[in-house]
Image (tube, rainbow, N blue to C red):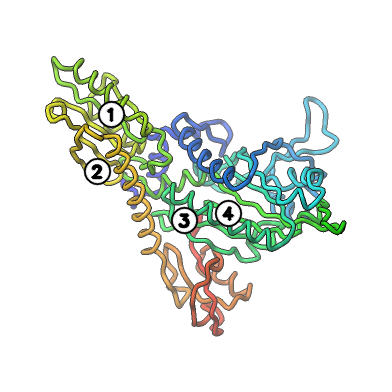
Amino acid sequence: MRKEEEFSDWYNEAVEKAELSDKRYPIKGMNVWRPYGWSIMRLIDQAMREEFDATGHGEVSFPVLIPETEFAKEAEHVKGFEGDVFWVTRGGFNALDVKLVLRPTSETAMYPMFKLWIRSHADLPLKVYQIVPVFRYETKMTRTFMRVREIHFFESHTAHASFEDAEQQIREDLQINERLMRLLALPYRIHRRPDWDKFPGAHYSLACDTLLPSGRVLQVGTFHQYRDNFAKVYDVQYEDEKGEHHFVHQTTDGMSERILGAIVAIHGDEKGIVLPPAVAPVQAVIVPILEKGRQEEILQEAQKLFLELRERMRVKLDDRDLRPGEKFFAWEARGVPVRVELGPRDLAKHAVTVVRRDNGQKRELPRDGLPDRLRSVLELMQIDMWERADKLLRENTSSVDRLEDAKDGINRLGWCGDEACGKAIGDRTGMNVLGTPFYPEEFDGKCVVCGKPTKQVVYAAKAY
């Protein structure tokens, strides 16, 4: 099945062939992580933990249930989620005095505790994160990793003494995001969402959008500046050096399993998924090519090779009693970055045959210094995967002067900044208005709707 012709069917087949997830669980949109898919997600989680631990965040774990009394305090937040939440109304046979919400996100769970934890300026900044399931009653068509009802979710929450400190946190989050997206080989754009589409309760929202080969964008990260909006609702204050009390300023940073969906969609091909080496559970698979009468000798050499490589990378020896072609097919479907073949000819040359998963390039490499050579191959593959995906993003981002010229991919349009014109862009193109570029761009033209002169651009695309 060709990816560019039937993307949706190809995507589902690629996920199934790689044994990442099983959607046959008897609740729609609540899928079962299979071992291989979960091992990829754990590596992504590990990369996130390392980044946020290194920047002074502490990991927490909050309960999954939120009392309606706390959830209902922030009216705008509740309004934004009222159609998306699951309610728990009974405990055993007894109706609950206070209904409980399965968390759709954790502001209303965490901030009553922030009020208890923060007393003085010495308690700031407070920076925490958690990696947990969140639940949203998704009514649209579900798609594995991209749109589900139980979401594997990363969220960081911070509290600061001032708006300026919170702004600096947003900048730090964007730097973290850049490093993570490089590891995942996911080029992206940062858009400031229009006010009518910002996170409920936020002062402003930024989104990290990546482009899939289907011509649609996928939001893979969000950054929200709350100012003191939530602090005023939950009475989160600190006392300064003069004894005066002030509301804290807060931010959040969120990512989810959509990241894995983007990796599958952007890098996969007709053979299956292709994994960036940084998050591949198996970075190199050794496949012995056996010859009758020399099976034991070749397997012993393969075992020796495995021991040589395992100190430098995540490696697996496939010594199953299967034909080499069957093994090649299975590991290609799983996206293993490098296949190392070891057969009689390789033994004679004291070499191995190395095949890259991303481009099919086959090379003979000497056994001497092989661990270092393979590390170089993996590093080069990581760079090449980013560059190919970045080319896809750049080549499918177009400047458009007329609404009727909008096309699949990301469209760059002049916008006067008026909400009516912004919404008209979405209504008349059938696209999502992604927002304005966070990093300033030069523009001198006209609003694509009303024709007024403007120096501001807005981006629009179809989205998942």
Q: Tell me if mark 2 has few (under 14), some (14-19) or many (20+) residues whose alpha carbon lies within 10 angstroms of its own.
A: few
Residue picked out by circle 3: 210
Mark 1, secondary structure of its residue: strand
Whole-number angstrom distance, CA of label 2 to CA of label 1? 16 Å
Mark 4, secondary structure of its residue: helix
Residue 123 pos. (x, y %): 76, 48
Which mark, residue 286?
1
* Residue type, mark 3 in image: Thr
Residue contact at pointers 3 and 1, CB within 8 angstroms = no
Residue 239 pos. (x, y %): 83, 54
Whole-number angstrom distance, CA of label 3 to CA of label 2? 25 Å
Residue picked out by circle 2: 360
Residue in front for this viewpoint, 110 or 313: 313
| Quarter residue 421 falls in | bottom right
Whole-number angstrom distance, CA of label 2 to CA of label 4? 36 Å
Comes first in the chain, label 3 or label 2? 3
Residue 393 pos. (x, y %): 40, 60
Comes first in the chain, label 4 or label 1? 4
Whole-number angstrom distance, CA of label 3 to CA of label 1? 33 Å
Q: Tell me if mark 1 has few (under 14), some (14-19) or many (20+) residues whose alpha carbon lies within 10 angstroms of its own.
A: many
Residue picked out by circle 4: 173
